[in-house]
Image (cartoon, coloured by chain):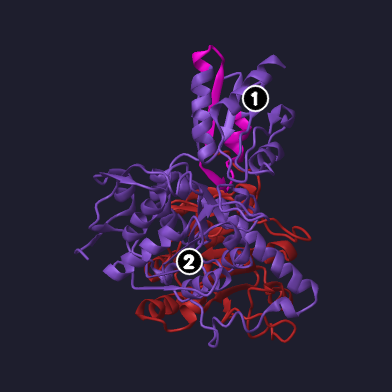
Amino acid sequence: MAISSYRVIPGPESYLSPAAASMGVVLPEKGEALIEGKIVPEEEAIEKITEKLILAKNPFFFPGPLILWAWNEKAIAKAKAVKELAEAAGAKIIPMPDYRPKYPMINPEEEINPNHPNLTIWHNKIDTCVFVGVHCHYANLALKIIRGGTDCYTIALCGQAGHEDAMITLRDIHSEEVQKLTEVVKRAKGGTPQ
Amino acid sequence: MMERKVVDPEYMFKRAPREKKFLIGNEAVAEAVKRANVDIAIAYPITPQSEATHIVGDIYAEGYIKDYYRGEDEFNVMSAIAGARMGGARTFTATSGPGTLRAFEMFPLWAGARLPVVCAFMCRGVNSPLTIQPDNIEIGWLMDTGMLIFHAENPQEFFDMTLQAYIVAEQPDVHIPIGVCVDGFFVTHTREIVEVTPEDEMLPPYDPSTSPVPIMDMEVPPIRQMRDPFVMKSNYISYNTHASWQQEVRAAGERAKKHIARYVGKFIEVTNPDAEILLIASGTAAAQARVAMEQAREKGMDVGLAKIRVIRPFPEDEVRELAENPRIIIVPEHNIVGWLAREIKSRIDNSGKVRGHPRVFGGMTMPPEFIMEEIVNGRAR
């Protein structure tokens, strides 16, 4: 397959951005990740995520229904791990509790919605965000809209196959992998969670 | 019903022992359904599909499927299939020609709702005066619904592709419907040797927890999508969301390519790719084109064949590469509009070399001699 020259980078990109998959960006295999549309080893992406989170002025985590709702023990464990990661990174949390479109009634200080995520990002002046626990279809929908209309740097920690529309994506991320990422972030920040 | 065990899909498709049976296409697809670990089958009878769904009913009675019923019509059937899939069940259904059109609204809905439905289309003519005979014009209409489309040439491919379709469609990064199409009667009612996998082996069950959308509950958040549609809003935000949604469905089709390559195999089977005249065909037109190619080569003519097995996602890169060498490309088809020729012309730079003939429709057969006429005419040009 031809290597895509398309790069998934912060926007605002376009009136209507393309889906990265339609521009030739392919999802990583196990042990791999994507940085700005390019396949890299997972370790390289973990380093880049750590760098982006530490250097961000106003980082936010957007946890979705897969971890906000206590579906099972795994969901609960992953939610706790994500909260610890966000705290270690010094990031704030705005939840994506459900997927119902809420424009124009959304309160962008309290929640983010996949159908109009740009509103929450603009309102809170978010420069780096992390999607986690969002069903893949809705994550892709939101990531593309964010790239189209904002300059926010997007990171997706996916429990499945990853997201081409995020600027960095890891795949197969569950509570254990989140905990490992937390340790990397803590080490990079000198061992002291902010 | 015999005791059955779940097996790895790749083992089933590539390494499982095969038993030879003498089956018509409608029996072959039912044999696939028997091994597909289907939760519910719903259908409405229509020629030439009826026999297949009748046999699927027998399979249900034997205990191979958990539930089965006949819907009131095809729109009802395909709507019910959507509901079953939204609820997390693995489904099977099938239809033909006018039934496809009656149900048509549901096909982009399946794709938009990210439902990995597998539907067999036993293609037939759509016309007045009424025809029940072979004609695959409905594939041309299905091509822009967001569904993936496989086009099986014979009962063997119908068996294999139906099973493979479940595994491709249900990948978390794909999760859109697949239509497994055959040319009615030529495949559905033609008896051939079909090599089937062991009857006591079945696919793993569908795992709804990997779905890219939540299992649908119409009333309860976080899933209550359909009760709050942004279709009601008239503003840029809503339009942009709709556009992104459609893009994501097409992106899922792109992601399917690697899974199709893994589980289904080649998108295109090519014989003599460097020939002066290349026949490109799908379905039973490929079978007739193969005979024509062999006859032409016996007479010293330089003719090749590319059989396209996957219509959506269309193998554009492969077709562009194939189109570089031949002086003439001939595209025989079983429909009046020439959807395959149109598709090929739209994808390559040098479309003037594509001859969208011969075409037969309304139930007519395509004698290899009819294709040979095009080859001879093409050489003389």
**With A40 as the anchor, is A22 left or right in this view?**
right
- Quadrant assignment, res B127: bottom right
Q: Residue furthest left?
A: B3
Q: Residue furthest top?
A: B300
Q: Is residue A31 visible?
A: no
Task: Report the front residue among A20 and B20.
Answer: B20
- Chain identifier for the red-coloured part of the image: A
**With B289 as the anchor, is B374 left or right in this view?**
right
Q: Chain of mark 2?
A: A
Could you tell me which secondary element the residue under label 1 belongs to? helix
Q: Is residue A23 visible?
A: yes
Q: Which percent across, then down, holds residue B371?
A: 59, 27
The disc label shown at residue B374, or none? 1
Q: Between label 1 and label 2, give the one nearer the viewer.
A: 1
Q: Amino acid at mark 2?
A: Val
Q: Residue at x 61, y 38 (%)?
A: B333
Q: Residues within 10 Å of mark 2 (few under 14, many from 20)?
A: many
Give the quadrant of the N terminus of chain B.
Answer: bottom left
Q: Which percent across, then down, holds residue B290?
A: 50, 28
> B250 above or below A75?
above
Q: Chain of mark 1?
A: B
Examine the structure image and report whether residue A100 is included in the region drawn in magenta.
Answer: no
> A112 above or below B241?
below
Magenta stretch in the rendered image: B297-322
| Chain B rendering hue | purple
The disc label shown at residue A147, or none? none
Q: CA distance from mark 1 to mark 2?
A: 68 Å
Q: Which percent across, then down, holds residue A38?
A: 56, 48
The disc label shown at residue A185, or none? 2
